[in-house]
Amino acid sequence: MFTREVYIRRREQLKKSMTSGLIILPGNGEAAVNYAGNPYTFRQDSSFIYFIGLDTPDLCCVIDVDSGNEYLFGDELTLDDIIWMGDLPSLKSRCEATGITNVLPLSKLKGLLEPALKSGRRLHYLKPYRYRNQLLLSELLGIKPDTVADNFSLELTKAVIALRMEKDALELCELEKAGEIGFQMHLKAMQLCKPGMSERAIAGTMEGIAIASGNRVSFPTILSQNGQILHNHNHEGILQTGRLMLTDAGAENENCYASDFTRTVAVGGIYTQRQKEIHTIVLQALNHSMQLIRPGIPYRDVHREAYRIVFEGLKAIGLMRGDAEEALACGAPALFMPHGLGHAMGLDVHDMEDLGETFVGYDDEITRSTIFGYKSLRLGRRLREGFVLTVEPGIYFIPQLIEKWKNEHINQAFICFDKLPAYYDFGGIRLEDDVVVTPDGCRLVYPKRLPVTIEEIEETIKSS
Ligand code: GLY
Ligand code: MN
Ligand code: MN
């Protein structure tokens, strides 16, 4: 946790940015794997962590915007809890670290809200993503569970996004720690990337590093020779010479901040000519995008410039053709890069995605495109100093998508379809770094960059 003053200040800022009413911020509970006593590793809700900091289950915070009063609801441990799970300082004393002094049992929560409900005061909550909190809010508000999500507070959502989006020095320090763990995970993966190794063993080793050095992985590890499957969680392959291993993974540090890196490396560090050519284009797109990032530039425009590099690079090797502006207007490079250039990152790997990706990544000025490829960009808005985001261009050969475009003549003026079957066993290459926007550009969140050039990657794998 940070100091008490940090949480007090954040809640004061939140109250100032709201007009009136009561804010209900439920924390998360335990979630059972196959029976109640066998839960998934506990993960607190990120907005709860941001405003309250306590990382234990079954808590709920209520903030009265009008009076300024703050309440923390939760139950003290029972003797049974202590016998089986261990003791903790009392909730009352743990709450001192949050700056909240009104600590009440959960049974009092409904009673506090009832007068507000009766008098028609606005009760604000964020859209819940877990059934347990959906049911809690249904019970507290007296509305059906399936109407809870629709009644979330847009005012609260926007206020929380505005506060969480810009990272301060304390948060950057946590993100850097998460970056260091992610760095070690990826370095190990590269060192293990030898013919005959199983994807499962490498993914498991990476996950072990995340757990040993922090909380856990920041999202399910993507590690596969089938990199053309963008979020491939299958680790059943055995590494073979001539293929590429795409690894997209990160860690969550002890204070729940995330990292998210991708490297794609040739098994055994031996690249084919084709792999070198595609790697070089993706690296150019990554470096060029990072050079463009600065306060004021819409990330939508940086994504478009990454598409330009992909287009020009693939044109140079005979896979695309035509005029760049026309190709970009149609989104033709999306055949090879159907995903967005990046996303916000913080307490969540895709920061605040639970609050609504479009609320986080777009605004009144910059709205989401409906064109294939562009529409998958999670973050399109103008960047500001303190934003933390990923930069993750890629080039993939997805046979089913290529066949569809070919058969339906989609963007055929820009794509050399006859050359593509030779790449159907290529897989894909993605390279991803995490940056923070500075007053005049951007810098890596974790200052050491993972090996990224072909020479650096070859050296890392061959010297291990
Ligand atoms: N979760 C994969 C990525 O955003 O990079
Ligand atoms: Mn990633
Ligand atoms: Mn990412």
Image (tube, helix red, strand yellow):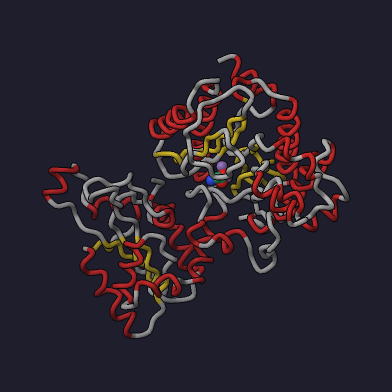
* Quadrant in which the C terminus appears: top right
Q: Is residue 98 left or right of residue 169?
A: left
Residue 58, x across and y down, in percent:
28, 57
Direction top: furthest residue = 463
- In the image, ligand 3 is in what quadrant? top right
Residue 22, x across and y down, in percent:
39, 73
Residue 27, x across and y down, in percent:
34, 58
Residue located 51% across and 34% down the image: 182
Viewer-proximal residue among 78 and 441: 78
Residue 461, x across and y down, in percent:
59, 19
Residue located 74% across and 57% down the image: 408
Q: Is residue 259 left or right of residue 63?
A: right
Residue located 77% across and 56% down the image: 409
For residue 294, say whether it is visible: no
For the image, the number of numbered tags is 0
39 over 59 or under it: above or below: above
Viewer-proximal residue among 100 and 166: 166
Direction bottom: furthest residue = 119
99 over 262 or under it: above or below: below
213 over 46 or under it: above or below: above
Residue located 83% across and 38% down the image: 318
